[in-house]
Image: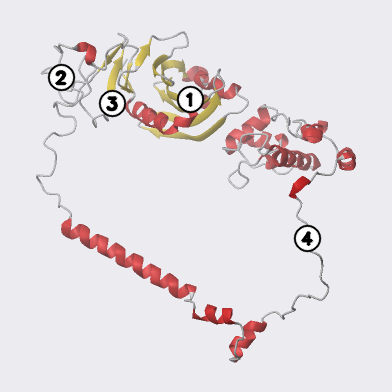
Amino acid sequence: MAVVGPVTERWAPEQAGPVHENWQLAAPIGPATDLWALGALLFRAVQGHAPYPEENTAELVQLVCAEPPAFAEECGPLRPVVESLLRQDPTERLDFEELRGWLRSLVRSAPEPEAGTHVVSAPPLDATRLPVVRRRGEIVRKRRAGLPDRQARHKRQEKAPKPRRLGRTLLLLILLALAAAVAYAMVFMPKAGPDASSSVQPGAAGPGPAASSDTDPNPGTDGNAGADPGSDETPSSTPSKENSPSQSSSSGTQTTGPDLPQGFTLRKDSEGFSVAVARGWDRAPKNGSGQVIYSQGRFELLIVPGRDTASEYGDDPMTYQREEERELQPFRDSTWATSSGMRRIDVGGRSMAEGQFTWQDAGGREIYVRNLAILADGRYHVVQLRGPEAERDEVTRLFEQASATYQITG
């Protein structure tokens, strides 16, 4: 699969089927496979893109086996030929004689293109001006023999610096600049000493820009305004006597690990999890699909705390993410959707699958999705961030904080 890559011409359904089932490279099948490749090539040449998404080999193989190709709507008179060549059943494709007849008929009936005003007429031919015939290597032999060169432009080329000498000079200048930068850093940059470390250790109690007390006289100005009572934001980090710095208090305060970036707060949800969410986001109650949704504008954070079990959906998070996860059903239903970055992660007895997806929502807008499926204690937990396709960086920033801080508390 790594050698062939995500190329539609090389993955006819009869080739992709064995690979999809056994994950082994399939040998070419026969003439029908070549006809499939021709159909995919004609589709690509006329439509400007492949009949299937080609971002990922595994996804391409799966789609070729499961779904018909895109309609060849822009192929004009070639459309019935292309769609016949791309039929999933090899026995239903055109044979070579039928294909030859179709193409001959199309070529005979094709009109000549109209050049219009873009034609540039060639100058009249002057038979008295013949090109000068020069033997190959003639100038080189003259130069090696020490004969004078009569053309001034060759003399100017002789005086020009040699490319090899110029390359050595540039390399020397770059090395000198690097050496000067290192010397400057060693002499003028401040050195770290024993007093350079912060007086507040990670995880220790201390005031911060998001800190607040339980007796805040202006609770309406905090990021908790409008939050659902089912979750607790934890902007405070002051430990009590009952809770040591290595534990979380009953109100959801987390005092271990690195501090959250500015603009985020750790929320302990009553559904049995905690996660870092951007301040001011609204929380919707758990819906009938078992989802807890935090949202603001066109951005949504979907949390599914252990709805599906491994006994029902298997213990492979990659298969669960690709075929079973309900939060990705719009991706599987969409005609034009892409996926990338799909990988499995095994850490500390937990198995996870991560992926990036795009599809069109009900309003026809392109959305970008980062997804993480976690298998813990026989149950699947899903952390998914959705946002506009044009704001991938913001989706990634929000997702990385949520996926890194998601903890099961229930």
Q: Percent position (x, y) of residue 318?
A: 50, 29
316 on left or right of 260: right
What residue does disc 3 label? 263
Cβ atoms at labels 2 and 1 below 8 Å apart: no
Q: Earlier in the sequence, mark 3 or mark 1?
A: 3
Marks 2 and 1, how far apart in space? 36 Å
Q: Residues within 10 Å of mark 2 (few under 14, many from 20)?
A: some
Looking at the picture, which amino acid does disc 4 mark? Ala
Marks 3 and 1, how far apart in space? 36 Å
What residue does disc 4 label? 122
What residue does disc 1 label? 315
105 on left or right of 63: right
Which residue is the extreme one toward the bottom? 146
Looking at the picture, which amino acid does disc 2 mark? Asn
Closer to viewer: mark 3 or mark 1: 3
Q: Earlier in the sequence, mark 3 or mark 4?
A: 4
Looking at the picture, which amino acid does disc 3 mark? Gly
Q: Residues within 10 Å of mark 4 (few under 14, many from 20)?
A: few
Q: Earlier in the sequence, mark 2 or mark 4?
A: 4
Looking at the picture, which amino acid does disc 1 mark? Asp
What residue does disc 2 label? 243
Q: Quadrant of the N terminus?
A: top right
Q: Secondary structure at mark 2?
A: loop
